[in-house]
Image (cartoon, helix red, strand yellow):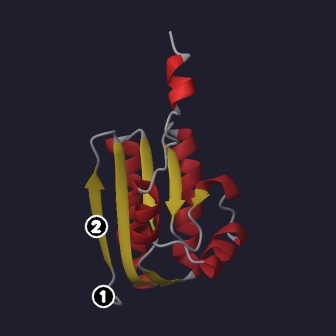
Amino acid sequence: MTGALVEVDFWADGTLVVHPRGLLDAGDAVDLRRTLVQAIRHDRPLRLVLDLSEIHGLDAINLGTLAAACHLGDDHHVAVFLDHPSIALADQLLAAGVPAHRLRHVGAKPHQLHGEQLHVERPEASPASASELP
């Protein structure tokens, strides 16, 4: 075991977020698989998001586990998404059979997206357009 850690969070909107961290090798495969199967088959959230932003590497077994989680989610009507993979990891996941539409925010870190999401520009109404409103 490489000292990898998997944390699970539930969001108020029904999303379950799994945060694996570190280098996931064969010694971590059973724990990751158990976590994902428990989430999909028993917890059955609306969405399962795997936040891969803190993954330093995956072996072939864990790559296959993530690909299988997408298919298992389909079987149990749970939308599975893999967020924040590095570009190299995204390429590996695609080669392992993860559908491209499951990968989100490739190459972006969560803190980068958070700042972008908070910055929303709204055009100010001009006096002429405001007077035209009923």
Q: How many C-alpha atoms fall within 10 Å of the one at disc 2: few (<14), some, or many (≥20)?
A: few
Task: List x then y, in percent, for residue 111.
Answer: 39, 70
Q: Amino acid at mark 2?
A: Glu
Task: List x then y, in percent, for residue 123.
Answer: 52, 42
Q: Amino acid at mark 1?
A: Gly
The residue identified by callout 2 is 7
Task: List x then y, in percent, for residue 109.
Answer: 47, 73
Q: Using the image as rendered, state which of residue 116 and residue 77 is in the foreground.
A: 116
User: In the rendered image of this protein, does residue 23 appear above or below residue 72?
Assistant: below
Judged from this view, the residue extending furthest toward the front is 128
Please give the name of the residue rendered at 46% of the width and 50% of the height, measured from the top-left corner.
120
User: In the rendered image of this protein, does residue 131 appear above or below residue 107?
Assistant: above
Q: Where residue 127 is drawn, which disc sits there?
A: none
The residue identified by callout 1 is 3
User: In the rendered image of this protein, does residue 29 appear above or below residue 36?
Assistant: below
Q: Using the image as rendered, state which of residue 130 and residue 36 is in the foreground.
A: 130
Q: Secondary structure at mark 2?
A: strand
User: In the rendered image of this protein, does residue 36 appear above or below residue 46?
Assistant: below
Residue 127 as seen in the image, left or right of residue 2: right
Residue 37 as seen in the image, left or right of residue 59: left
User: Disc 2 to disc 1, how far (Cα)?
Assistant: 13 Å
Task: List x then y, in percent, for residue 129.
Answer: 56, 25
Please give the name of the residue rendered at 34% of the width and 88% of the height, measured from the top-left corner.
1
Q: Using the image as rendered, state which of residue 53 and residue 2 is in the foreground.
A: 53
Please give the name of the residue rendered at 35% of the width and 50% of the height, measured from the top-left corner.
16
